Image: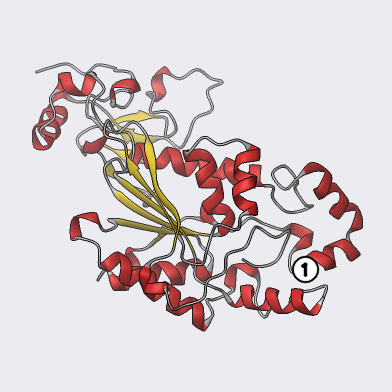
Amino acid sequence: MRSRRTLDMGGGLQGACIIPRQGYVSVGGALGDAVCHARCSVAVCGACMTPVARLGRDHRRGRPTVHGGCATCADNVMQEMGVTENSAVAGVSAQWPARLWVVRHGQSAGNVARDIAESNGAALIDLEHRDADIPLSALGERQAEGLGAWMAGLPEHERPTLIVSSTYVRARQTAAAVARALGQPADSVSVDERLREKEFGVLDRYTTSGIRETFPALFEQRNLVGKFYFRPPGGESWCDVIFRLRGIVGDLQRNHVGARVLIVGHQVIVNCFRYLIERMDEATILAIDREGDVPNCGVTEYAAAVDGQSLELVRTKFVPPELADEPVTTESDRPAGAR
């Protein structure tokens, strides 16, 4: 029997295991840890897949996962996949999902309330719920159904195999509409709190004019620092959002190679994913934001490159034809307020 060995991750293999990433199953959530066959039992770092026994005391470990590299497991899984050890070591195994869609939720009741407050020059947005509980508007529900109809119209082998949503109600409602259209059960949609809206802190529910009048020092600081780095008290900057999304990007690479993943989030989430995946800088992503390029239920789509080592942008700002008769919100990120 072949002995277990340690291989570096550059060849598409994980830490102590000889099995290519495609042979893993996911446990602990849709974007959680990945393990190989149940017969393996080597504990590894959940972040870098290095065997725990080899880690130094100062290593910043991710959540440990059960994982390993018994030769029987490797033989079985690789045979089922039709992947040879030599081809895996040579680095031909993929590193990304085959397809990734990042979508903004449909129009929310908060979008409507904010627009009314802004047009009336009010300082505060009149909302019944906290931001996390704001539902879709009637228009937003139709937009979500249109998005679902478009995805259901794709060839079966091109439809999402995994739907992951922000924990916020408006995003979950949008994701649920897509799942229904695809004939998937409601509980098939996974939620991940890292996809939540950017947090506004003390500026929550204030309009732009309300911030200027109530928090003049913060208003000036934001203009000086810029929204990419500005963090209101109790809230987040774009950098904070990017930091939490880096974990999701890593999970996609580690746990969902070859899958077709739909992510439903918020305007800033869409832009921050673009920043990460397309390796943008501050000026580039803020220029895109100023264009107001994230419509309600607008689609940003990526496909894995031929070698599987990167994602390539297919389209962005795409509004499915099924939404052609429905108005959409296309505006840049505001300082505060529900989006």
Residue drawn at 52 percent across, 53 percent down: 270
Residue 287's spot in the image, x, y percent? 63, 46
Q: Which residue is mark 1?
A: 207
- Residue 186 visible in the shown view: no
Q: Which residue appears at 47% of the width and 39% of the height?
A: 277
From the top left corner, tell me how far across and down residue 307 is, in percent.
27, 30
User: Which of 278/249 is in front?
Assistant: 278
Q: Quadrant of the C terminus?
A: bottom right
Q: Nearer the viewer, residue 254 or 218?
A: 218
Q: Quadrant of residue 311?
A: top left
Q: Quadrant of residue 331?
A: bottom right
- Please, is residue 276 above or below residue 29 in the view? above
Which amino acid, mark 1? Thr
Q: Is residue 128 left or right of residue 18?
A: right
Say above or below: 102 vs 81: below
Q: Give the image quarter of residue 46.
A: top left
